[in-house]
Amino acid sequence: MLVVRDNMVLTTLSLQHTTAQTPETGILRVNEIFFSLQGETSRVGLPTVFVRLTGCPLRCSYCDTEYAFYNGESMSISSILEKVSSYGAHNVTVTGGEPLAQKKCLILLRLLCDAGYSVSLETSGAQNISKVDVRVVKILDVKTPGSGEAKKNYWPNLEYLTRQDELKFVLCDEVDYQWAIETIREYRLERICPILFSPVYSKLDPTLLATWVLRDRLRVRVQIQLHKLLWGEGPGR
Ligand code: SF4
């Protein structure tokens, strides 16, 4: 089907992102699927469909998605693709919880790419990312001491990051900030991909973090979670 608008011929998104020939390939536990603006990363502000998978083996001190640890419904991957398609969007983010805790997430990611979406994955950094489809933009957390989960960082993952990916430090305080600087130096993270510094919501003052980053001439991007500024905390945003 073609749509004519302003003397331009546009192919509808439903044709670009077809799911008609997608085979049934497994079941995933899904906490929620919703349409919103991407609140973080270099994709901030882009209309995006979020697929939030249930479950996470970590327990970060600042976790803002604890509701995703246990709840949700079992969905076939083809049902998930149909639901994603219904929003008519181009960008899709697979998140959690920890999406890679469910092995069939890898299939979902591949099929989303095959369907023509621009796909990003938000992962804790504690799961092996080596089998993630290379077309997926990986947003990989580096867990700081303040998270309480720093020992879970799986450093071999660094080998599988490219310039299209992003490393994210969620910072609780100045101790985390200094630790992040040392970690960037130790692993030479700037040579791998862009780095994000994100203050823990309602804990570390973003203005203070911005001041530190400017003072220290860091080559990082300070980010504030846009969706929380717009809508506050809670599911579905
Ligand atoms: S990895 Fe993410 S979802 Fe899991 S506990 Fe930490 S912040 Fe929460």
Image (tube, rainbow, N blue to C red):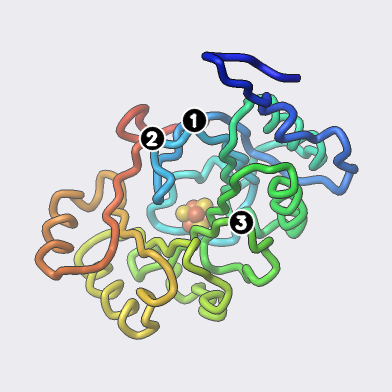
Mark 3 element type: loop
- In this rendering, position of residue 166 left or right of residue 4: left
- The residue depicted at 49 percent of the width and 58 percent of the height is 139
Front disc: 2 or 3: 3
- Residue 49 position within the rendered picture, expressed as x and y whole percent measured from the top left: 58, 35
Q: Which residue is mark 1?
A: 36
| Label 3 beta carbon within 8 A of ligand 1 | no
Mark seen at residue 227: 2
- Inspect the image, locate mark 2, and give the three-letter code of the amino acid beneath it: His
**Quadrant housing the N terminus:** top right
- Inspect the image, locate mark 1, and give the three-letter code of the amino acid beneath it: Ser
Which of disc 3 and disc 2 is earlier in sequence?
3
- The residue depicted at 17 percent of the width and 55 percent of the height is 210
Mark 1 touching mark 2, by CB under 8 A?
yes
At label 2, counting other C-alpha atoms closer than 10 Å, the crowd grade (few under 14, some 14-19, many 20 or more) is some
- In this rendering, position of residue 207 left or right of residue 49: left
Q: CA distance from mark 1 to mark 2?
A: 8 Å
Q: Which residue is mark 3?
A: 136
Q: Is residue 219 above or below residue 191?
A: above
- Inspect the image, locate mark 3, and give the three-letter code of the amino acid beneath it: Val
Mark seen at residue 96: none
When asked about the image quadrant of residue 233, the answer is: top left
Which of disc 1 and disc 3 is earlier in sequence?
1
- The residue depicted at 71 percent of the width and 19 percent of the height is 2
Mark 2 element type: helix
